[in-house]
């Protein structure tokens, strides 16, 4: 079937051949331009990212040519490139704002989460920027006089542009938009835009070339009108274009920023400016609220939804948040990974974390944020998803991994965790699961400190390590007879050793502490105690091919393992796979059930839809409705119980 004209982007399938359409001498200039654009950082790792932007290479070359010919004056080509970067920044800043859940969650219009499918569909949201940059470059080279003859500011030009916007752009957009909701145009063009269920700033530009060409014409009319009247200016171009993008992002932010009192006190404003609620109603119902920015034209066209302002009042009141059923309480790992969050770059957070060198550009900003968080911040909401009608949230303790090892910081960290638990208890949250170092034994006894201090807690505090142990144990080969266990006297090491010895599996527990070894050995039934063996050197496992690693292994340590060894891991960070003749497992993790909704960010280095086993353990605790706390030592008797419950609810090993 032949696609409708202008329903797909002409450079979509050009791949590497797009470079062949450009001047090769412009390539370095294009790279310099890209590095200065926040959009490059916004979508790190995208395939053919630089190649796609090579479409702008002639514009870069022209800007350099104009710069040389005009001395230090900026030509229109340079202005267009600057606008390109500033427009990208506007969209990025609005995206960051709308996804700062700790600030916006109670005023979100559509409560659903942004999922991976929508992020992937909108990955090339900036196609409109490339299109408009090319169209504008052709226009300024052929029609508009050189910028050296154009004033920086011209007040009459702004007035003319405003009049043309109200009298031309607004009604034209309204009529064109309504026509795109006709059967043919909607099914062949506009339905793509409405396939995004949760409005986001990037959704505003997500559409077909035909739609974006129409928007380009609407946007250009006021500027052309001002220049045709002889009152155009450089300042007008910048201010109008950026204001236009700002208002579009505002409408698609999915966060109601206007107080309802404003429209109550000044009712005429309801016809002059739309709101995120107004736009979201159009996005969901599709048969009303077609205006660009001014609802006046919906009123004149009898397409204004009658509940627009009542709903706006309800959402702006800040009561649209909802109480989660489950909370996963995490902490920041390090400065670089602190940018792997949805409100920074969604294209980064929607993929497993890697230490991308481009993020180093923003390291000073991230480091400054760390210092501010240390002094001023408290636990905040980061992300959420829904599972079987239940809201699950991730909260962040504003502390970084290294801070947990500073003696003077320990009390403050426990206070942050305690405040989060008490807040969850007050809100009526059922289960709160502690992540990583938040449940460190030396810090708070795996959560026992808080449960003992507050015996009347209604929220169940969970460390989730029972399921972590279950995941590791179920990875082992069925026929295994002997293992070596490092980190053997840790919480997880103890549970694994006690479980395996009951299965008649010999466990070489690597530890220098005979006292701690004997304490664990005595916990085992008498008839199984001889399966637990203390070893103090890695060489003791030179014939053992099953290593369970809970402590960092250097290359020298790994050399003692025979060829064909598999390293199962519960050490953080994971060990480096030095041996090519061995295999290495991942950290214990589970894939969430298929019916999870609104999940759009990866949990640190985990794949999409995969969470750490301790996170999954909290989810199972919530779904099962268990009423006990899971803190302190792991109950070995419950390992199989928790494992079967996880599988019953559709969680699977990752």
Image (cartoon, helix red, strand yellow):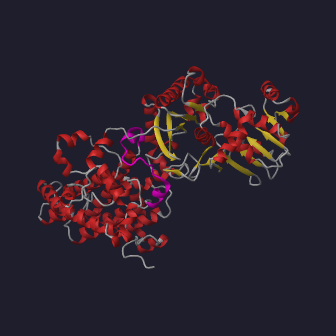
Q: Residue furthest top?
A: 453
As displayed, is residue 474 above or below residue 154?
A: above
Q: How many labels, in total?
A: 0
323 over 91 or under it: above or below: above
Q: Is residue 427 above or below residue 294?
A: above
Horizontal arrangement in the rendering, residue 618 relative to residue 585 (left or right): left
Residue occupying image coordinates x 27% and y 43%: 258
Tell me if 228 is positioned left or right of 39 in this view.
Answer: left
Q: Is residue 86 among the parts visible in the rendering? A: no
Q: Nearer the viewer, residue 233 or 515?
A: 515
Of 538 and 550, nearer the camera is 550
Q: Is residue 344 magenta?
A: no
Q: Is residue 449 left or right of residue 280?
A: right
Picture quarter with the N terminus: bottom left
Where's residue 374, x and y in %? 47, 30
Q: Quadrant of residue 618?
A: top right
Q: 383 or 16: nearer the eye?
A: 383
Residues in magenta?
A: 100-121
Asked where in the image residue 570 lies, by quadrant, the reply is top right
x 65%, y 47%: residue = 648
Taking the view exactly as shown, the residue that stands out farthest to the bottom is 2
Q: Is residue 113 magenta?
A: yes
Percent of width and height locating residue 69: 26, 65
Q: Residue at x 61, y 25 (%)?
A: 444
User: Can you give x and y, in whole percent of width and height, for residue 352 in the image?
Assistant: 56, 51
The percent position of residue 103, horizontal first and vertical second, equals 38, 38
**Can residue 443 be seen by looking at this rendering?**
yes
């Amino acid at each position: 079937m032949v696609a409708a004209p202008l329903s797909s982007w002409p450079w979509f399938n050009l791949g590497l051949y797009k470079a062949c359409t450009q001047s090769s001498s412009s390539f370095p200039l294009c790279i310099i331009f890209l590095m200065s654009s926040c959009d490059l950082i916004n979508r790190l790792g995208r395939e053919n990212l630089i190649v796609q932007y090579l479409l702008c290479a002639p514009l870069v070359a022209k800007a350099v040519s104009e710069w040389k010919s005009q001395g230090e004056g900026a030509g229109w080509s340079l202005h267009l490139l600057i606008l390109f970067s500033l427009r990208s920044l506007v969209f990025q800043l609005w995206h960051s704002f709308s996804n700062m859940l700790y600030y916006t969650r109670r005023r979100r219009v559509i409560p659903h989460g942004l999922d991976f499918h929508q992020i992937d569909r909108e990955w090339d949201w900036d196609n409109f920027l490339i299109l408009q940059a090319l169209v504008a470059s052709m226009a300024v080279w052929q029609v508009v006089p050189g910028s050296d003859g154009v004033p920086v500011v011209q007040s009459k030009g702004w007035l003319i542009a405003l009049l043309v916007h109200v009298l031309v752009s607004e009604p034209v957009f309204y009529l064109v938009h309504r026509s795109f909701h006709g059967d043919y145009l909607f099914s062949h063009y506009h339905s793509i835009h409405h396939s995004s269920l949760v409005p986001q700033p990037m959704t505003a530009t997500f559409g077909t070339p035909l739609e974006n060409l129409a928007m380009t014409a609407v946007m250009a009319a006021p500027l052309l009108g001002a220049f045709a009247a002889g009152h155009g200016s450089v300042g007008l171009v910048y201010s109008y274009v950026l204001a236009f993008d700002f208002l579009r992002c505002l409408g698609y932010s999915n966060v109601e920023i206007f107080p309802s009192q404003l429209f109550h006190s000044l009712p005429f404003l309801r016809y002059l400016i739309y709101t995120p609620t107004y736009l979201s109603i159009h996005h969901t119902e599709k048969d009303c609220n077609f205006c660009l920015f001014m609802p006046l034209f919906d009123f004149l066209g009898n397409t204004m939804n009658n509940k627009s302002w009542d709903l706006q009042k309800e959402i702006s009141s800040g009561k649209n948040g909802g109480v989660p059923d489950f909370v996963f309480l995490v902490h920041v790992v390090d400065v670089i990974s602190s940018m792997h969050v949805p409100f920074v770059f969604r294209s980064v957070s929607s993929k497993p974390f890697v230490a991308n060198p481009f993020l180093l550009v923003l390291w000073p900003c991230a480091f400054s944020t760390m210092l501010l968080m240390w002094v001023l911040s408290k636990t905040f909401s980061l992300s959420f998803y829904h599972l079987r009608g239940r809201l699950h949230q991730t909260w962040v303790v504003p502390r970084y991994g290294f801070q947990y090892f500073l003696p003077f910081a320990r009390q403050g960290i426990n206070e942050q965790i305690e405040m989060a638990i008490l807040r969850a208890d007050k809100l009526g949250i059922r289960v709160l699961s502690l992540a990583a170092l938040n449940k460190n034994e030396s810090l708070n006894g795996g959560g026992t400190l808080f449960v003992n201090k507050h015996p009347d807690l209604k929220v169940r505090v969970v460390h989730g390590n029972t399921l972590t142990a279950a995941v590791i144990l179920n990875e082992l080969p069925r026929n295994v007879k002997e293992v070596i266990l490092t980190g053997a006297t840790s919480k997880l090491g103890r549970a694994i050793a006690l479980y395996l010895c009951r299965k008649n599996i010999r466990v070489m527990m690597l530890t220098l502490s005979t006292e701690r070894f004997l304490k664990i050995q005595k916990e085992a039934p008498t008839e199984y105690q001889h399966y637990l063996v203390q070893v103090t050197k890695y060489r003791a496992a030179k014939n053992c091919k099953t290593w369970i690693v809970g402590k960092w292994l250097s290359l020298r340590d790994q050399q003692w393992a025979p060829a064909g060894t598999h390293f199962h891991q519960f050490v953080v960070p994971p060990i480096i796979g030095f041996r090519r003749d061995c295999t290495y497992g991942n950290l214990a993790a589970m894939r969430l059930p298929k019916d999870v909704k609104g999940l759009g960010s990866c949990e640190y280095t985990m794949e999409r839809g995969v969470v750490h086993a301790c996170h999954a353990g909290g989810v199972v605790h919530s779904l099962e409705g268990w009423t006990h706390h899971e803190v302190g030592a792991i109950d070995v008797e419950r390992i199989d119980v928790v494992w079967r419950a996880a599988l019953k609810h559709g969680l699977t090993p990752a």
